[in-house]
C-alpha cells in the first residue's frame, strides 16, 4: 500500500460470527487466512476455524488505506487479541444473532476488548437476526449500555460488501467526531 | 481438552502420554512436550504444566501463520517451526499421516543442540503417528 494514510481496524467476535467472511467481502487483495479444520464440533458445527488471524486491505474512496485484521474467536486464542489490537483505531464486533448466547457473547467480547484498549471505539454488527423481531437491536444496545459501553449496533449480512463498509464508515465517523481529523491522521 | 481428546480412544491417549514421558526422560534438556490439534487444543502433554494449554494454542497459531507465509512466498507446506531464543528453543513439528492435523510442540533449554533436538522430535513424531492412528 503506497498511501501514507493507513488505518488498522480489528474484526472480532465469537467463533462463527462472520469475521473471516466480512474481511473476504471487502478486501481489495486475496485475504491472508489461517483457517484449519475445526475439531470442536460441540462448540460450533462449522468445518474450519481461524487460529491466528485474517488479514485484508481496503482502499477507501478518499485514498485512506485500511488494514483489516480478524481475530480468532475462541478464548484459548485470546493472546492474539491483544497482539492484533495493538495500534488499531477501532474494533468491529460481530455477533451471531441466531446464537442462544448472542447477548452474553456481546457482553463478554465488548468487556474484554474494552479492557484491552478503553479508548478504542466499537461498532457492533449483528448477523442472522430474526426479521420479525423489531426490538432486537435495542436489546443489544441496552446490553452494551448496561456494561458502560456506548456503540452503534447494526443488523448486517457480512457477505454483503455494503453492510461491512457501513460498519467501517461508522467507525471512522466516530473517530472524526471525537477528534476531527484523527481518523485520517492515524497510522 | 475434551473436544479433540474424544477423537482418540483412552488407551491411545495413554500410549501417547507414555511416549511423551519417555521422550522427555531421554532428553533432559526438554522441559515440555505437547501434542496439539491444528485448531489449538492440547491432546497430550508431559509434564502436565499449566502453560501446556497455552503453548498448544500458540503453537497452532504460529504454525498456521508460518504456512500462510510459506504460501505467500510460493513455497510448499511448512514442515518445521523453530524459535531460537538466548536461553532455549521451541520446535513445532507435524505428526505425519494423521487427519485432522496434529503437531508436537517441544520446549528445550539453551544447552540442547538444535540438530539433535529436531532429530529426537522427529523420531518422537513418527512414534506418535503410530500410536495415534484412529
Image (tube, rainbow, N blue to C red):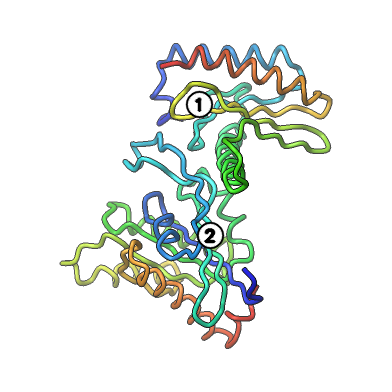
Q: Are marks 1 and 2 in contact (CB under 8 Å)?
A: no
Can you give x and y, in whole percent of width and height, for residue A66 in the image? 55, 70
Q: Quadrant of the C terminus of chain A?
A: bottom right
Q: Residue at x 40, y 31 (%)?
A: B3
Question: In whole angstroms, how far apart are the C-alphas of marks 1 and 2?
Answer: 29 Å
- A19, A152: nearer the viewer: A19
**Which label sits on residue A117?**
none
Q: Nearer the viewer, mark 1 or mark 2?
A: 2
Q: In this view of the protein, which residue sits in the foreground, A82 or B90?
A: B90
Residue furthest to the bottom in view is: A180
Element on which disc 2 rests: strand
- Circle 1 crowding by C-alpha within 10 Å: few under 14, some 14–19, many from 20: many
Q: Residue furthest front?
A: B74
Label 1 marks which chain's residue?
B
**Mark 2 belongs to which subunit?**
A
Image coords of residue A98 (percent x, y): 26, 55
Which quarter of the rendered picture does the N terminus of chain A lie within?
A: bottom right
Disc assigned to residue A69: 2
Question: Who is closer to the viewer here, A103 or A76?
Answer: A76
Local packing at callout 2 (Cα closer than 10 Å; few below 14, some 14-19, many 20+) is many
Q: Quadrant of residue A178?
A: bottom right
Give the residue drawn at x 39%, y 36%. A40
Give residue A88's quadrant in the image: bottom right
**Residue furthest left as drawn:** A132
A159 to the left or right of A178: left
Q: Up-down: is B18 above or below A29?
A: above
Q: Is residue B128 left or right of residue B83?
A: left
- What label does residue B43 carry, if any? 1
Relative height, residue B44 to residue A181 (above, below): above
Q: Please give left or right for residue A38 compared with residue A10 in the image.
A: left
Amino acid at each position: 500500500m503506497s498511501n501514507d494514510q493507513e488505518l488498522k481496524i480489528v474484526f472480532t467476535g465469537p467463533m462463527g460470527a462472520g469475521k473471516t467472511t466480512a474481511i473476504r467481502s471487502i478486501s481489495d487483495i486475496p485475504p491472508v487466512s489461517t483457517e484449519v479444520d475445526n475439531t470442536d464440533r460441540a462448540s460450533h458445527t462449522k468445518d474450519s476455524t481461524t487460529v491466528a488471524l485474517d488479514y485484508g486491505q481496503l482502499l477507501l474512496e478518499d485514498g485512506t488505506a485500511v488494514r483489516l485484521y480478524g481475530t480468532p474467536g475462541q478464548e484459548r486464542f485470546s493472546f492474539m487479541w491483544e497482539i492484533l489490537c495493538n495500534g488499531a483505531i477501532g474494533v468491529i464486533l460481530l455477533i451471531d444473532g441466531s446464537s442462544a448466547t448472542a447477548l452474553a457473547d456481546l457482553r463478554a467480547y465488548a468487556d474484554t476488548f474494552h479492557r484491552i484498549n478503553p479508548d478504542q471505539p466499537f461498532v457492533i454488527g449483528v448477523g442472522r437476526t430474526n426479521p420479525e423481531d423489531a426490538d432486537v437491536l435495542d436489546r443489544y444496545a441496552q446490553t452494551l449500555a448496561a456494561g458502560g459501553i456506548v456503540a452503534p449496533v447494526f443488523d448486517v449480512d457480512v457477505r454483503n460488501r455494503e453492510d461491512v463498509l457501513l460498519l467501517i464508515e461508522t467507525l471512522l465517523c466516530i473517530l472524526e467526531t471525537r477528534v476531527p481529523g484523527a481518523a485520517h491522521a492515524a497510522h | 481438552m475434551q473436544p479433540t481428546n474424544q477423537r482418540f480412544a483412552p488407551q491411545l491417549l495413554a500410549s501417547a502420554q507414555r511416549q511423551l514421558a519417555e521422550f522427555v526422560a531421554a532428553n533432559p534438556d526438554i522441559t515440555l512436550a505437547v501434542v496439539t490439534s491444528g485448531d489449538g487444543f492440547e491432546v497430550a502433554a508431559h509434564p502436565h504444566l499449566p502453560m501446556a494449554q497455552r503453548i498448544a494454542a500458540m503453537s497452532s497459531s504460529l504454525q498456521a501463520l508460518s504456512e500462510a507465509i510459506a504460501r505467500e512466498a510460493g513455497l510448499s507446506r511448512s514442515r518445521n517451526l523453530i524459535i531460537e531464543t538466548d536461553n532455549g528453543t521451541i520446535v513445532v513439528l507435524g505428526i505425519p499421516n494423521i487427519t485432522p492435523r496434529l503437531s508436537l510442540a517441544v520446549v528445550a533449554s539453551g544447552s540442547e543442540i538444535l540438530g539433535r533436538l529436531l532429530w529426537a522430535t522427529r523420531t518422537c513424531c513418527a512414534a506418535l503417528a503410530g500410536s495415534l492412528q484412529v
